[in-house]
Image (tube, rainbow, N blue to C red):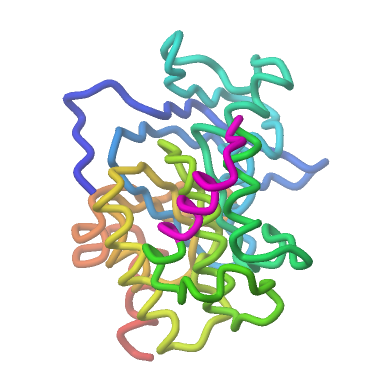
Amino acid sequence: MNGSTESAPLLSVEGLSKRFGRIVACDDVSFHLYPGEVLGVVGESGSGKTTLLNCLAGRLPPTAGHVRYDLRDRGLADVYTLSEPERRMLMRTDWGFVTQNPRDALRMSISAGGNVGERLMMNGARHYGDIRAAATDWLDRVEMDTQRIDDVPATFSGGMQQRLQIAKTLVVKPRLVFMDEPTGGLDVSVQARLLDLLRGLVRDTGISAVIVTHDLAVVRLLADRLMVMKDGEAVEHGLTDQVLDDPHHPYTQLLVSSVLQA
């Protein structure tokens, strides 16, 4: 987590808005994300944080604004002006997405190793031995028992399924990962171990990430910068410790105080 504003942004968001009829889900959000930086996005349910994440990740076209990404071969380009094949390639190679429910991202009928290897094969890998070795390495890196490489995900706990999803996402070495409540729905003890794992992986791989969560402890541990969403607007944005230790907006103050009183 060592992003620097001295470098060019990896992701540049300008005036991003999303409306569903009369409902404004996301309104005029702008920010830069730099290489190696982690941005946390927090807010209560309905604040617009998940809509924002889906617009950033190319899953939901915005009503207005731009999402520009630093492509390897041409620099900053608007994601929504890319062709559909170009956008799919981007999602397979440079980007990753970690969902709250790992079952949404895993193929439950194939082995753990097959889930990880499938993403490699989507990017051209064909040598079985190399694919299995990479899958074994990543199962080890997410602290799973490599002896269970041939077991199907349905035999794993929720925490282990989330670890498997993370391995599947990171095996292709993406530069940017989007995470939607990555520790949501897990027991507190499992959450703590998974957060420690994520923090180490982010540090070791140097990836950039946008993490959406309602849990301030998650962003305190993982995020360099923090954006607070309310009614579709980014009401506060700054360094994570500064925002959490000295919140300026009344809504952020309410969020922080509610955690302190819990």
29 versus 223 height, above or below: above
Query: Is residue 127 rendered magenta in the image?
Result: yes
User: Where in the figure is residue 58, as x and y percent of width and height?
Assistant: 64, 34
Answer left or right for 232 relative to 261: right
Residue in the image at 49% along x and 54% along y:
229
Residue in the image at 45% along x and 8% along y:
74
The extreme right residue here reads: 21
Q: Quadrant of the C terminus?
A: bottom left
Answer left or right for 246 relative to 165: left
Q: Nearer the viewer, residue 239 or 134?
A: 134
255 versus 73 height, above or below: below
Q: Nearer the viewer, residue 20 or 196?
A: 196
Q: Nearer the viewer, residue 134 or 5?
A: 134
The image quadrant that residue 144 belongs to is bottom left
Please state the extent of the stretch shown in magenta in the rendering.
124-138
The extreme top residue here reads: 74
The image quadrant that residue 92 belongs to is top right
